[in-house]
Image: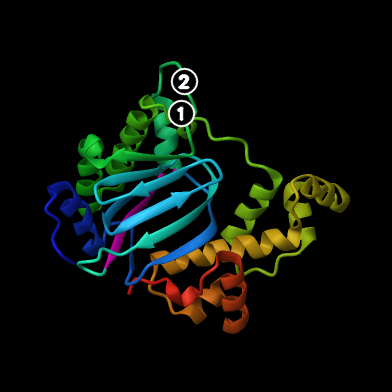
Amino acid sequence: MTASPDPLLAEMASLADCQRADGYACITARREHGAQSVEIPHPQFAILLQGRKQVSTAHQTLHLVPGDLFLITRRCRIDVVNTPDPHTGLYLSAIVPLCSEALAAARMLWNEPLPEAGDPLARLPLAEQAEPLRRWRSALEHGQYSEARLALASLVLALCRRGHGSLLLPPEPSLGERIRDLIAAQPERDWQSRDFEAQLGLSGATLRRRLANEQASVRELIVDARLAHAMNLLYTTQLPLKTVAARVGYRSLGSFSKRFAARYGLEPAAIGNG
């Protein structure tokens, strides 16, 4: 990797080789690729290190360059295009989930009037959050995960003061989102409607009626949640495609690849840490 002239970017990029960076992921792509309607289930942020990124929803479009912090404050779906740097041929981004512990700590510490919810996506200058990010990085480097979560909590507080209040007040998940979360916890399981009925305390008729009101079905949700989990594995691990397919409940790699391509508009082999 070419060294960054920006010291803060270089510090963030150095975590790519940190074995203790639990919950930290680096993504590389040696050619431009994009994906459609990618579900982001939880708040997170990304630090663009090399290349460019374009992200859009029905209401927002953001263009990001190295030195930007890309914030996702609540569950949403995005279309994304990642473009490698023309000089190095690499796209590199650090993705940091805002874990439930860090968000809960921020909620406990917040004692001011709640800010506006803000947009689900935001582009922010990385340098403005240098202090908590450096504390987070140092804590990870030394395996101090409690301190790392506290650093993330302080980052969340700073972001909320900038008007991103939905980090403190996550919306109540819909029935479909609750079902997706159940599937995501065990994507390889042979899920049936009766499993959701039992776990959610709903009759079959009520389950189908409420999902119909959300324009969803059990079958669609199972496929969607499995493929979303596969997308995450492809971006954040070096697992072979066959292993990824098996981990999300597909016995056939061909069937998995076909469904993935139909869902996201690209072949799963186009994603990887190269």
Q: Quadrant of the C terminus?
A: bottom left
Task: Identify the residue position indicated by label 2 in the image.
Answer: 114
34 shown above or below 7: below
Q: State yes or no: discs 1 and 2 in contact (Cβ < 8 Å).
A: yes
Secondary structure, magenta segment, majority class: strand
What residue sits 29% from the left and 38% below the top? Answer: 151
Q: Quadrant of the N terminus?
A: bottom left
Res. 44 in view: no
Magenta-highlighted residues: 90-99
Q: Which mark is residue 77?
A: none
What residue sits 50% from the left and 65% below the top? Answer: 231
- Amino acid tagged 1: Gly
Which is nearer the eye, 48 or 154? 48
Which one is earlier in the sequence, the residue at label 1 or at label 2?
2
Q: Is residue 96 magenta?
A: yes
Q: In the rendering, at what x and y percent does residue 56 appear?
A: 48, 49
What residue sits 20% from the left and 67% below the top? Answer: 87
208 shown above or below 124: below
Q: Which mark is residue 165?
A: 1
Q: Mark 1: which secondary structure? A: helix
